Image (cartoon, grey):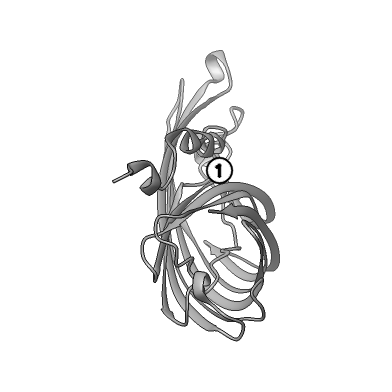
Amino acid sequence: MNTSENRIFHPAALAVLALPALLSCAHQYNLPANKFESPEVSGRRYKPQIELPVLQTGPQLLIKPNASASAAENSTPKLTSFALNYALGFAAGLDERVDAGARIQPNGPVAFRGRYQFYGNPSATADPGNIAAALSAGSGISMVADTVGANDSRMDTTAFYYKFDVGLSAGGRISRKLLIYLGGSFDYYGYGGSIKPLSGPGASFSGSAMQLALHGGLRFNYDAFFLHLEASKASTTSGKINNLMYYPGVVAGMQF
């Protein structure tokens, strides 16, 4: 057996995909509203799909330590209403009904995700008029450390972030090249950490955010290339703060 034909992803490509995670800031936590989970899985076993780039929008949690503030003040997060973030991703079909992959972004956990199509034909065999429906789920965790200030005002901080999400999407194929869909999703985000000044008492922080979203999108394929557009309406809650906004997103990439 030629093992090179069955390799899902080259290790060097994984290193490139991991680069954005190395550029993340410890205390900015993106909550992207866009999912880009269409109801048709690829249907191509072990054939990879590369998402480059993924442009997502959504709210953002800010947990920014300030050397001039107390540790207790620093441990209070803020929820912004809108932030643009980018990601890199890949996926591959495990069989005719299941896709699995990951999406890597700065300021958030690496999101491992899977999708199960329970109705309709997969993309590889779908004809115009195909109606499809799929379930999706994802999860991830990251841990980071940072130091702010200098000399006597230095503060050491650590933080961890985790998430999980579930979703449902359904849609129809207009032509060989165009698929449209609607969907919904639920996300749970958790975070925690500690702030330790060089002198004086430290503080710990923890909390969570939840997001309910509706999605509408289309996916256009041309040979090995694809373009995925999605608009999402999301309600995001963290503590006593609630945001309800519309968020656009776009993915371009290649499938093999």
- The residue identified by callout 1 is 107
Q: Nearer the viewer, residue 33 or 157?
A: 33
Q: How many marks?
A: 1
Secondary element under disc 1, as helix, strand or loop, is: loop
Residue 5, given in percent of the width and then of the height, sits at 39, 46
> Which residue reaches farthest left?
1
Residue 234, given in percent of the width and then of the height, sits at 62, 69
Q: Nearer the viewer, residue 94 or 141?
A: 94
In the displayed structure, 65 sits above or below 41; it is above
Residue 37 falls left or right of residue 205: right
For the point 44% across and 49% down, which residue is it? 191
For the point 60% across and 86% down, which residue is it? 129
Given the image, on which type of amino acid does mark 1 rest?
A: Asn
**Mark 1 neighbour density, 10 Å: few (under 14) some (14–19) many (20 or more):** many
Would residue 79 be visible to someone looking at this image?
A: no
Residue 19, given in percent of the width and then of the height, sits at 54, 34
Residue 192 falls left or right of residue 58: left
Q: Nearer the viewer, residue 108 or 89?
A: 89
> Which residue reaches farthest top?
151
Residue 190, given in percent of the width and then of the height, sits at 43, 54
Would residue 116 be visible to someone looking at this image?
A: yes
> Which residue reaches farthest front?
1
For the point 40% across and 56% down, which residue is it? 139
Quadrant position of residue 222: bottom right
For the point 66% across and 78% down, which residue is it? 175
